[in-house]
Amino acid sequence: MVDPVGPGARAAAHRLTTPHNPNLATDVEAALHARETTTRPDQYLDPISLGALIVSIASLAWTVYNDLKKQTPAPHHDVITRHVRIRLDQAETPQPALSPTDRDRYIDITIEETLNAAQDPTLGQD
């Protein structure tokens, strides 16, 4: 299966872009590039910018999905979201200052788009 983190993060950035953060897509592209060039792919990015936060959430959602899929063939979206929130809360890396409502929105949309990308049969086809 092809990695849905990039398409999921890009789709989330598209949905989350507002006049207050018009460069979100560019920030996500930069974070995705950093993710591809890191020497430790299992290490999560330092989510200081919103773009890096989206990529971190997408990466974490994909990891959680794959871990849960070993236990059940179709992990429920709510279970994945709960695991992602817990792991983000436990992360020792700084996160952008977002209201709890905005943080939840970023998490929900990014997970939804990442899981949608994972189900896309055209993902990875040229």
Image (cartoon, rainbow, N blue to C red):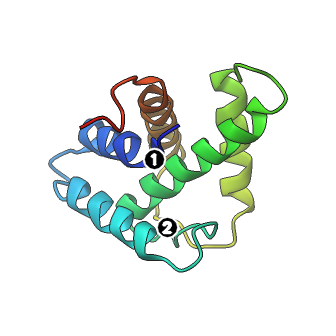
Q: Position of residue 78 (x, y in %)?
A: 67, 25
At 16% from the left and 54% from the top, the residue drawn is 22
At 61% from the left and 50% from the top, the residue drawn is 60
Q: Is residue 65 left or right of residue 58?
A: right
Q: Position of residue 73 (x, y in %)?
A: 74, 20
* Residue 5: image tag: 1
Pointer 2 residue: 47
Q: Quadrant of residue 52?
A: bottom left
At 48% from the left and 50% from the top, the residue drawn is 99
Q: Quadrant of residue 33?
A: bottom left
Amino acid found under the numbered disc labelled 2: Pro
Label 1 residue SS: helix
* Of 21 and 52, the residue lying toward us: 52
Q: Position of residue 11 (x, y in %)?
A: 31, 38
Label 1 Cα neighbours within 10 Å, binned few <14 / some 14-19 / many ≥20? many
Per the model, the C-alpha gap separating discs 2 and 1 is 15 Å
